[in-house]
Image (spheres, rainbow, N blue to C red):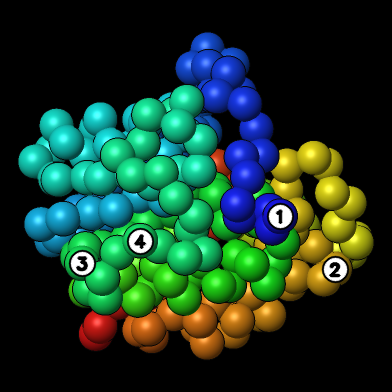
């Protein structure tokens, strides 16, 4: 059985007090803002975890449906992400946040292709980026706030070791950003509109694929 056809963690893994920290809360805000910017009427989220994205997005007026292999997470649809049970373009936007790395790399690319197939406007994903950076922020009079993420010097990527959850991460020896970005672009239906790391927690790297 492929990894994409069986749950990787128990539903209890997503207990809020243990699972959600300040970085995840900031990431949740970024998720909703990024999806909302594409002005979708119907959204599909792959791998909903504790369901926070759907709850917040619904409060903002978005219609969100979820898909997961694990019925214990109470998704709207139970199924495999590598073979989505939906017609082409059935949803406006399809998203997956911190989910693709839970599959072997080649499987994650097939999931991205499937997400692109069933999306009409675009695809939004986030994945871990483990490269260390220094965060700098200044506030200049009459200019406002300016932020930078500066790579730490002399850092060298290391081979990835499967930890029971993540099969790969951006910044590991096998999956540098340049490779991930190229492979994602080849798997998606649209060009890469934007990719960035959150200043609040640079562990979260976002990708948006959509028409110009």
Task: Give the spatial CA distance, label 3 vs label 1.
Answer: 27 Å
| Category of crowding for the residue at label 1, using alpha-carbon neighbours closer than 10 angstroms: few (below 14), some (14–19), many (at least 20) | few
Judged from the image, the secondary structure of the residue bearing numbered disc 1 is loop
Which residue position holds label 2?
A: 173
**On the picture, is 137 further left or further right than 159?**
left
Q: Which of marks 4 and 3 is in front?
A: 4
Report the disc number at residue 32: none
Say which residue appears at 39% left-offset and 67% top-offset. Answer: 115
In terms of image quadrants, where is residue 64? top left
- Residue lying furthest top: 17
Q: Specify which label sits upstream in the sequence, 2 or 1.
A: 1
Discs 2/1, front: 1
Cα separation, mark 3 vs mark 2, equals 37 Å
Within 10 Å of the Cα at label 3, are there few (<14), some (14-19), or many (20+) other Cα atoms? some
Residue 90 has which mark? 3
Which disc number belongs to residue 85? 4
Q: Which of marks 3 and 1 is in front?
A: 1
Q: Mark 4 and mark 2: span between their CA atoms? A: 34 Å
Give percent across and percent down for residue 158.
Answer: 90, 60
Q: Residue 64 or 37: which is nearer the viewer?
A: 64
Alpha-carbon span between mark 2 and mark 1:
27 Å
Residue that appears at 16% across and 55% down: 42
Q: How far apart are marks 1 and 4 (CA)?
A: 18 Å
Residue that appears at 38% across and 29% down: 74
Task: Using the image, tell me which numbered label, if any, was put on residue 1.
Answer: 1
Give the position of the N terminus as an image quadrant.
Answer: bottom right
Identify the residue at horizontal 68%, vertical 72% (top origin). Answer: 106
């Amino acid at each position: 059985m492929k990894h994409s056809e069986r749950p990787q963690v128990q539903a209890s893994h997503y207990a809020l007090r243990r699972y959600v920290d300040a970085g995840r809360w900031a990431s949740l805000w970024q998720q909703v803002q990024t999806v909302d910017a594409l002005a979708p009427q119907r959204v599909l989220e792959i791998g909903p975890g504790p369901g926070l994205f759907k709850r917040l997005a619904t409060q903002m007026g978005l219609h969100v449906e979820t898909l997961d292999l694990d019925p214990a997470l109470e998704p709207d649809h139970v199924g495999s992400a590598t073979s989505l049970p939906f017609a082409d373009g059935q949803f406006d936007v399809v998203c997956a946040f911190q989910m693709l790395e839970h599959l072997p790399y080649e499987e994650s690319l097939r999931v991205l292709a499937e997400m692109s197939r069933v999306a009409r406007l675009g695809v939004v994903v986030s994945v871990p980026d483990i490269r260390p950076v220094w965060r700098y922020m200044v506030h200049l009079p009459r200019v406002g706030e300016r932020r930078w993420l500066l790579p730490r010097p002399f850092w060298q990527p290391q081979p990835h070791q499967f930890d029971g959850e993540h099969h790969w991460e951006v910044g590991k020896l096998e999956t540098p950003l340049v490779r991930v970005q190229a492979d994602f672009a080849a798997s998606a239906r649209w060009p890469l509109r934007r990719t960035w790391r959150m200043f609040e927690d640079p562990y979260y790297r976002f990708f948006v694929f959509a028409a110009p």
